[in-house]
Image: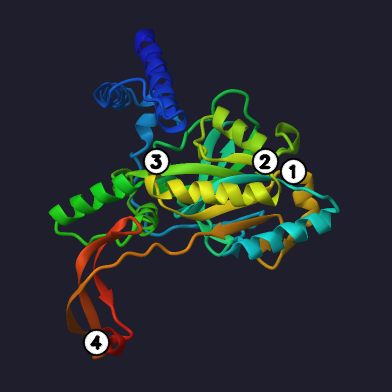
Amino acid sequence: MIPKPIVKRSVELRELINQYNYRYYVLDDPSVPDAEYDRLLTELVALEKNYPELVTPDSPAQRVGAKPLDAFGEVKHVIPMLSLANAFNEDEMEVFDRRVRERLNIDVVEYAAETKLDGLAISLLYENGILTRGATRGDGTTGEDVTLNVRTIKAIPLRLMGNYPDFIEVRGEVYMSKQGFSDLNKAQKVKGEKLFANPRNAAAGSLRQLDPHITAQRPLLFFAHGIGQYEKAALPGIHIEILKKLRQWGLPVSPKTKKITGIKQCHEYYQMIGECRASLAYQIDGVVFKVNDLAQQELLGFVSRAPRWAIAYKYPPEEEITKVIDIEVQVGRTGALTPVARLEPVFVGGVTVTNATLHNEDEVRM
C-alpha cells in the first residue's frame, strides 16, 4: 500500500511539470528556472522508481524509459498526409488564388497563413486525452511508428489539457531550433562524431533513432499545424479556430499564424515573414496559405497528392559569397573521382559551410 502523502505528491509533481512545460513550450513564458524544473522531475523519477505502481502512461517521468527497438512498425494513415503544391513567385500565387475563387464562386478568400517549418511531418494520435501513437508521414499513405521517440519530446504533451475530444489526430512538424542545432553539432564535434548538415537533417535523424534514449538527448521541438481524424462535433469549422483549440489543449502552435483576407494580404504576409526570416529561432523555407473554412476545403478537394485548398509559397534559396581556398579530389568506394571545394567558412541557411562537392569544376577554374 502506497502512503497517501506519496500518492498526493506524485500527482502534484505531474501537474506542476506539465504546467511548466505548457508555459515554456506553448506560451513561451517560462515560470521557473531550469534548475527548479530539473529538481521536480528528478523527485518524480525517484518516486516512480521506488513505487512502480505510481507510473502512469502520461507521466513526464516516463519520457525516456523505453527500451531500444529492433525496427519501426508501419502505420497506415486513414487520411493521407499529403504534400503541398508550391508557388515561387507572385504570378503563381495569384493563379492559385484565382482558381480557389473560381471553384468556390466567391470574390475574396479568407486564408490561414503560417510559416513553413523545415522539419519532419508527424502525426500524433490522442485517445481520451492520452498520446497513444506518433507516426512519420512516410510516403503519405504509410509511415513509421515512432511513438516511443515522440514521447521523449517535451514540447509534445503526453496528456491534453482542458475540454478535449475523446479522439483526435494532431498533425504538425518536429523541428530543431537554430541554437539547438548549433549546440548539437558542437557536442557531436567534442565526441568526435559526424556533424549534421542542417537542422532538418538533424531533426529527422534524431526522431528516427531506434534507441529512444538518444532521441531524448536531442533538442527537438514541435509545432502543430492541423488535424487528421477527429470527432467533427468536437471542433469548430474554421482552421484558425482549430489551432486555437490545439493551443488550449497544450500543443504548441506557431505564433506567426494569422488570419488574412484576399491575395493582397497574402503578398503582404509573405513579405513580412521574409523580412524577419533571418531573426526567427527556427529555419523556414516559405509560408503556407490554407483556405480557412473547412467546408470550403471539402468543396475544393484534392488533386493528385496535394490539396486544392493549400499552397506553400517558397522563398528563394539563401545565398552568400565566399572564397574557394582549394580543390581536392576524393576517391569513392567504387573508384569514382569527385572534386571537392574547400571553402572559406560561410554561414548560410542556418549552417556553416566549409566544403562543396563540385559538378562544374571547369567553370570554377575559369
State how far apart marks 4 and 1 are (Cα): 55 Å
The amino acid beneath tag 2 is His
Q: At 47% from the left edge and 63% from the top edge, which residue is drawn?
A: 316
State how far apart marks 3 and 2 are (Cα): 25 Å
State how far apart marks 1 and 3 are (Cα): 31 Å
- Per the image, the residue denoted by label 3 is 153
The amino acid beneath tag 4 is Arg
188 or 3, which lies in front? 188
* Label 2 secondary element: helix
Q: At 23% from the left edge and 54% from the top edge, which residue is drawn?
A: 185
Q: Is residue 11 above or below residue 194?
A: above
- Per the image, the residue denoted by label 2 is 239
Q: Is residue 241 left or right of residue 205?
A: right
Q: Which mark is residue 293?
A: 1
Occupied quadrant, residue 200: bottom left
The amino acid beneath tag 3 is Ile
* Label 1 secondary element: loop
